[in-house]
Amino acid sequence: MSHSSPFESSSASPTIPKMNFSTKLAFGVGDLGTAMTANIFAFFLLFFLTTVAGLPAGLAASVPMVGKIWDAVNDPIIGVLSDRTKHPWGRRYPWMIFAAVPFGIFFFLMWIVPSTNTQTLFWYYVIIAIAFHTAYTAVNLPYATLTPELTRDYNERTTLNGFRFSFSIGGSILSLVLAFIIFAAIEDLATRYMVLGLVCSIMAVPPIFLCVWGTRDRVAQVQAATGEVDAPTSLPLSEQVKIAFSTRPFLFVIGIYLCSWLAVQLTAAILQYFVVYCMELPEVAFTQVAIVVQGTALLTLFMWSKISEKYGRRIVYISGMGFWIIAQLSLFFLQPGQLFLMYFLCFIAGLGVSTAYLIPWSMITDVIDYDELKTGQRREGIFYSFMVLLQKIGLALGIFMVGQTLDWAGFIESVAGQPTPTQPESVLLAIRLAIGPLPMILSIVGIILTYFYPITREYHQEILLKLYQSNVDE
């Protein structure tokens, strides 16, 4: 006997067949290249700018910050333009196809040192960062908005996010494996990063074309079934902001996500400094540490998903952040030579990182359903665009905060051709504070917000039932 509920599926059209595995795979692989580049930026950019290019820490931290400020501007611009694009390939695909190669080229150009003059280098990296983030947005934002265009089914959208984040974390791990291999094979620091940038840029571009090739038939199929060949143009930005920030559960979600993601990016930006200067290990050891964290996050992603189905998202997030707080606090006290404990704490931290990826992005689907019940409209694009923007802001703030903290503490930048300098105790303390207490405080705030998050699993079931009854009445 079937015990299915009438609101377990929210497919907008029963004539649309279920997605096949190859389409889901093609969609997921679309996040591989952008994840690789974002991960390399998060883990290596600040260290490269201070230790290889030789920029002062405060100046180096301003490079990604300027790039992300520009991101805040170009996100809504490209979002509106892609919504209004009329092309035989559709609204999203032209952006992804034409921006893919520049995306790879500008990423590579971030990892060369064309001058020894500090001001010249700073402006060079600022210009390349602006160009890269423009291309990144032109690829990634249309890609993210493919989700509602591939299916109208609630459960299939959740599955698509599972494929997406599997490839996202997998791309992060792949980039770290490549870094480990390249760093082990090449001694010269500048050459290491130039080769890493070249290899990653070459590997990051093809998945974008594979995504387009593997999903285009499905998008056409959905459009033909629903008659939505040209969706209406997006609302003005001011109206989008008003809608998003008048939705109370969304305020909780963005608070939870910003705390989670900022904690992740703080840890990612400072981790290499911690391994090299506090643990007194060679630079190549950092990639092993990062692989343990990301590998654990990938392996436990579906474990947490299953636990969430049984006990709810709130329990999963609080549990994951609990593991993370233990790891971060312990890292603050970790001393050189305690290698086994270091890797064990990285494993524990990976349990928390996994929930930071999974839970906020799952909560946003609750918000979309809640908003539909209140307004009668589904506005995925508005809420997803703000989540993407917050992701970028978290990355920028993480790197900027680390750079400014190191500069304030007296970090000694490297000089080309000279040995790596010994850092003063004030810098070592700043590194430990950034790897431990700061992410821990953010995690605690995230737990508090999750505890008071108003959409419980039971309330969400009520929302779905009311939506179903509303559709039946219509």
Image: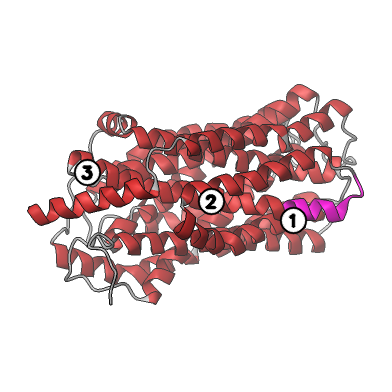
Q: Secondary structure at mark 2?
A: helix
Which residue is labeled 3 in the image?
Answer: 373
> In the drawing, does residue 9 fall left or right of residue 61?
left
> In the drawing, does residue 210 fall left or right of residue 427?
left
Which residue is labeled 1 in the image?
Answer: 287
Asked if marks 2 and 3 touch (Cβ < 8 Å), the reply is no
State whether residue 209 appears in this view: yes
Query: Is 473 one of the magenta-colored residues?
Result: no
x, y percent for residue 190: 76, 49
Instruction: Characterize the local packing of mark 1: few (<14), some (14-19) or many (20 or more) Cα atoms within 10 angstroms.
Output: many
Asked if marks 1 and 3 touch (Cβ < 8 Å), the reply is no
Instruction: Characterize the local packing of mark 3: few (<14), some (14-19) or many (20 or more) Cα atoms within 10 angstroms.
Output: some
Whole-number angstrom distance, CA of label 2 to CA of label 1: 28 Å
Which region shows up in magenta? 336-346
Which secondary structure class fits the magenta region best?
helix
Quarter of the image for residue 177 reads bottom right
Q: Quadrant of the image for the N terminus?
A: bottom left
> Farthest residue in the front direction?
1
Quarter of the image for residue 196 reads bottom right
Q: Secondary structure at mark 1?
A: helix
Q: Residue at x 77, y 34 (%)?
A: 431
x, y percent for residue 472: 11, 56
State whether residue 122 appears in this view: no
Q: Earlier in the sequence, mark 1 or mark 3?
A: 1
Question: Quick check: 8 above or below 118?
Answer: below
